[in-house]
Amino acid sequence: MAHSYTPGLTVTEQAVIRRRRMLSLPGSVLVTTGATVRANQAVARAELPGKVYPMNLANQLGVAPDEINEYLIKKAGDPVQKDEILAENKPLMKWFKTEILSPITGAVESVSTITGQVLLREPPRVLELLGYVDGRIVEVIPQQGVVVETNCSLVQGIFGIGGETWGEIVIAVTSPDEALSPRHLTADMQGKVVVGGSFISSDALARAKEVGVAGVVIGGIHDKDLRALLGYDLGVAITGTEQVGFTLILTEGFGTIPMADKTFRLLSAHAGQPASISGATQIRAGVIRPEIIIPHRAGSVTGTSATLPERGGIQIGDQVRIIRDPLFGKIGEVANLPSELQKIPTESEVRVLEVRFADSSTAMIPRANIELIEGS
Amino acid sequence: MASQEPAKTVHPLNVIVATDCGSTTTKAILIEKVGDEYRQTYRGEAPTTVEAPFEDVTRGVLNAIAEIEEHSGRKILDGDKILTPNRALQGDPKTGVDIYISTSSAGGGLQMMVTGVVQNMTGESAQRCALGAGAIVIDVLASNDGRLPHEKIERIRTMRPDMILMSGGTDGGAVTHVVEMAEYISAAEPRPRFGATYKLPLIYAGNKDAQPQVKNILGEKTALVLTDNIRPVLERENLTPARDKIHDLFLEHVMQQAPGYKKLIEMAGAPIMPTPAAVGLIMEMIAKREHLNLIGVDIGGATTDVFSVFDGRFNRTVSANLGMSYSISNVLAEAGLANIMRWVPFTIDEQSLRNRIKNKMVRPTTIPQTLDELQIEHAIAREALRLALIHHKSLATALKGVQQERTISDVFEQQQSGKTLIDMLTLDLIVGSGGILSHAPRRMQSMLMMVDAYEPLGVTRLSVDSIFMMPHLGVLATINEKAATEVFVRDCMVYLGTCVAPIGQGKDGERCADYAITFPDGREAKGHLSFGDLRLVPLASGQKASITVQPAKQVNLGAGAGVALTREVEGGVVGLLLDGRGRPLQLPTDHAARAALLTRWYQAVELYPTA
């Protein structure tokens, strides 16, 4: 390939990031360029058209569709209250009278003389779009949304579930290889972003829900526990809308895997500070990773538009994580980058690199099976 | 593609550059006329650049072509432009190409919602039409689909298709239901996936009598196109006009919204085709030219496409969530752990396997490094292939709802209308494509994955696409069928060999069939095939042999139980596979017995290296 792509997850103390906040349908933007916003502040608003209720009045009245207008009390465009009469027939004897009542409060949207169908629509629902991160508006897209910029520390996870939320960072374990157990989760962690170590068990997940934490950041989880938490087997890694009581972010993967030292150290250094987190993951083209954004304190927001440094090729000395068995989860640094293809035990001929671990041992790993730990 | 403009070239096509813009990678190939025949000569690839930060598909195209330039020494690009035509006549044969063509499935491909009146009649016809045009069908709405009206409206509203295809009713029949569906769509005010400002393209291909009402209801709200009914009478499907309209609208509307596609359309000398439509076209062309019944499969990271041509009838399905990387976890969810484990010849605990599969899902670009990991991936591939074929069989059917003439003898053999068209006994060729099949370390692994998943019956030839160039050849076929066919036969297809599989079951070691093979050099080989045997007979590519098989009394090879069959079989890079494992293929339920049997089979055909 002309440009070899090495996937990587960013863990950095200093980044200027931008988040595009877009309404799902046109509405109005509530802030102006240059304004400072808070994570929980509405930045745009839209009106979602109400639900539609079709009713076949011709059938209910027992008349032909093209006669329906003669029986309507409410015409197209008229407002209507729940249980108000929409249409009625005109029998010779009033005992045979049929009245059709509206099942909703809203308006009559349309009347069809072909099908005899009347469409009722509920009033619109207001949708508010929040800022998500503390920062500054750098762009307003009229009727659609804004771009928020923030100067922050950033940690990208590999996989998450649950949507955007906020909370103070609290470190629940003493080291990155310690598993998060129910005893670590105390009542004062309600509404906070709890950082664990290598693993969270099913009973600890239950405890997190009971406490009411805003989020959990952890090295790994067993697939079966995720399945139990969700209530189904996740087939494709497109997440962000799950409602399990909190947002869960895995930094390493599935299984018991110590959180990378760098990640644990960074999060520990920001204990007590507010963070914006999102579990939304989309592992497709246009990948979205879960993230932990720790905005730097007020006054430190820069006026520059600098973003993350562009990713270069992999180099000797880079810190990497092995992301496939048999050494899954191990972290080391690149010791050698041989250019020639090498035959691996499967008999495939692939490009490899040599990784040196903390104990000075080394291993040859296919380049496809490592991930850069990025960020300064 | 009847309604599209012809290729914009007048000069002879001697040098062709073609790309396929996939969702992750853009693959380019160079095709050159060498002597009297066309050959694929160089290839290049680069990441697709539809998404941010590039948001211009042509960047990836130019990068992939630049790689061809590096390898071939041919100058193709002049900045952001492709040099056409080739400068051979000016004495500079290494500069320029005669045409650039492309397919695309980037940005998730063409996503459509279809509607019908009766779910398994016009609903299915509309689905077949959209699938045949290369779309992913995200939902099929029908008057009788069991959903309440407000649920249908809510569904239309929340899905954001690229296009809607409406069908329903036979010409001259009742209009009420199809008009009702138009009213639901109108109420939902559907919005397209890309581009906030443009109207959603909607094709109406239902009862022609309802056209005025549909125009009245949807003409303002959508970019409405009216075309011929896809089911003018119950007994006949007429998919081509609507399929052509889908291709036109794909180019005119959908592609215009995707980043960089306006430029791409200008660069290309022929209409851009959706990738699966191009693959379908080449498969259909080959099947017709060779008078074959074939099944083609493209197993990708996210989806698995299955194509079939039986008795000249083409069908395509896409199993949107069966794949080997992004969707690997969904294969586990749909097939179940036991079905995957039945192909693994060793013990692994469930938790570890589940975690491994999820780790592949979140890191889809990783490759198996150990033999165990490779065998697990091959086990999963067998299940993905099997499930995708089941899905295909359910949709590649004769028309449902058609009255059948019955005689008194049929009373005892009630067959439902809408029987699947897929008949494994009359299947001539299986064509496999996609990374796990095209790049398996041993070709035998590709062959056995397909044999285990599809369980071909009788005599069936198998092949794989060497480097996934079927999309390129499909679009090439629209402008130069000769070039497409030549490259397909010589460079695209890698024939693996032929599988001979008797139908029937017996105890392990019991006689299944006797066979006699006459090789091209006149040499003869005779032998007994027992139940439980899997035997590989060398027969090289391009070689043909004659095989006579005398099956045991209750065993059938297509000519009837116990009836001998003589057939000419073709070789390949693997050879002739004699499969006495029985059909349907049944594996022992006991884990140790199954592992031992799998090991025996795998060793018999040298499937994996031995430690």
Image (spheres, grey):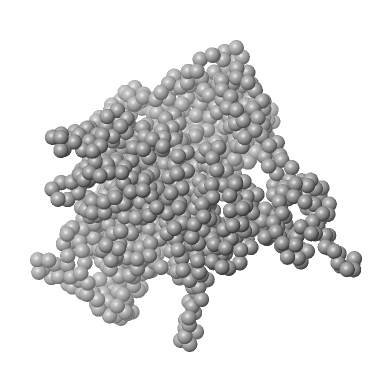
| Residue B385 visible, this angle | no
A373 w.r.t. B112: above or below: above
A202 w.r.t. B289: above or below: above
Q: Residue sitting at 63 percent across and 41 percent down?
A: A243
- Residue B551's x, y, as percent? 27, 77
Relative to A119, B596 lies left or right: left
- Residue B572's x, y, as percent? 21, 58
Res B513 quadrant in image:
bottom left
Res A335 quadrant in image:
top left
Q: Residue sitting at 61 percent across and 57 percent down?
A: B213
Q: Residue sitting at 27 percent across and 80 percent down?
A: B563
Q: Pick out the residue farthest to the top.
A: A299
Q: Pick out the residue farthest to the right.
A: A94
**In the depicted view, which residue is nearer to us: A81 or B561?**
A81
| Residue B177 visible, this angle | yes
Q: Pick out the residue farthest to the bottom.
A: B408
Relative to B596, B43 lies left or right: left
Number of numbered discs? 0
A82 w.r.t. A244: above or below: below
B459 w.r.t. B340: above or below: below
- Residue B567's x, y, as percent? 22, 72
Q: Residue sitting at 13 percent across and 35 percent down?
A: B91
Relative to B589, B513 lies left or right: left
**In the depicted view, which residue is nearer to us: A282 or A99?**
A99
- Residue A345's x, y, as percent? 28, 43
